[in-house]
Image (cartoon, rainbow, N blue to C red):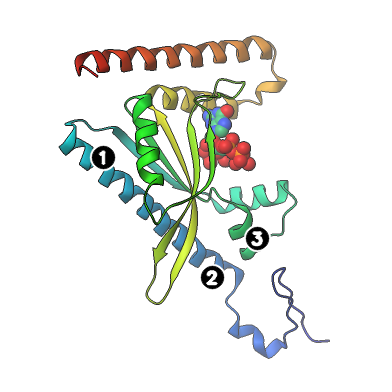
Amino acid sequence: MNDTITTDANPLILQQSSLELLPSFADQFNVLMTYYRSAIMEVETKFRVLDIQQSINQETNPIESIKSRLKSPESIMEKLQRRGLPLSIESIEQNLFDIAGVRVICSFPEDIYMLADALLKQDDVTLIEYKDYIENPKPNGYRSLHLIIEIPIFLQTEKRLMKAEVQLRTIAMDFWASLEHKLRYKKNLKNIEHYDEISRKLVACAEMSAMLDRQMEAIRNQIEGR
Ligand code: 0O2
């Protein structure tokens, strides 16, 4: 019997002799990850340019730091499986929008919206999804502005549109999210004693850090006469 290969996007029946012509899943996966890595570089550059421009115009740097990450192969496979989606290259591109992740840590909450607006005004950026967890924090206290965008990357002979997730937060929001993430992953919090009390304490910490953000911003605005 001939070997049969099927892909979810395009069912193919191939002879064994054709097999060596096909790039393996691993090869295609690695190429795709290179495209996402390129998308990260494009998005980072856009933010660095905005930061430099602000430092010239306003003599301030709205961005404290940028942390980027490419989702790991294990996380990609886990997410596809969890959602009952096909484990294929096409499925990754069509269904997962957070493989390229860029986290922009800002000084003040107003800077987050200024940077998001400036990014979304650029004519090569398409907004796919906008989730404002600052206006509407998650019940556990999590705050950040999340954007899913599509941007072009330019290869030798083609232009490819790639999706990326941008998370914009203040230092205080990042401080809370990083510690909450560590605590959550250290233990399965839901199974421990005093879970409700711990959840309430985490929400209270998130509210304190939001208050700190508002006060620091008010001081900045007072100093700068805004
Ligand atoms: P990592 O390692 O940061 O990538 P989903 O993407 O399916 O999990 P959804 O609703 O599409 O869920 O995404 P959502 O909630 O807009 O944002 C997902 C990402 O935001 C997470 O990615 C985290 O980075 C961050 N995030 C969202 N909620 C919380 C939270 O309660 N606490 C913390 N610390 N971070 C949060 P990943 O994939 O979970 O992890």
Viewer-side residue, 179 vs 50:
50
Q: Left of 225 or right of it: where is 87?
A: right
Residue contact at pointers 1 and 3, CB within 8 angstroms:
no
Q: Nearer the viewer, mark 1 or mark 3?
A: 1
Residue contact at pointers 1 and 2, CB within 8 angstroms:
no
Give residue 170's position: percent from left, percent from top.
39, 27
Q: Earlier in the sequence, mark 1 or mark 3?
A: 1
Amino acid type at circle 2 is Asp
Q: Left of 1 or right of it: where is 185?
A: left
Residue contact at pointers 2 and 3, CB within 8 angstroms:
no
User: Which residue is tagged 1?
Assistant: 51
Amino acid type at circle 3 is Ser
Characterize the local packing of mark 3: few (<14), some (14-19) or many (20 or more) Cα atoms within 10 angstroms: some
Label 2 secondary element:
helix
Q: Nearer the viewer, mark 2 or mark 3?
A: 3
Q: Earlier in the sequence, mark 1 or mark 2?
A: 2
Label 3 secondary element:
helix
Name the outermost residue toward the right: 1
State yes or no: Cβ of the residue under disc 1 lies below 8 Å from any atom of ligand 1.
no
User: Which residue is tagged 2?
Assistant: 27
Name the residue rendered at 69%, 70% in the picture: 9
Position of the C terminus, as image quadrant, is top left
Q: Earlier in the sequence, mark 2 or mark 3?
A: 2
Quarter of the rendering containing residue 23: bottom right
Name the residue rendered at 56%, 15% in the picture: 203
User: Residue 19, which numbered label?
Assistant: none
User: Residue 91, which numbered label?
Assistant: 3
Task: Give the quarter the ligand 1 occupies.
Answer: top right
Number of marks in the rendered image: 3
Give residue 75's position: percent from left, percent from top.
59, 47
State yes or no: Cβ of the residue under disc 2 lies below 8 Å from any atom of ligand 1.
no
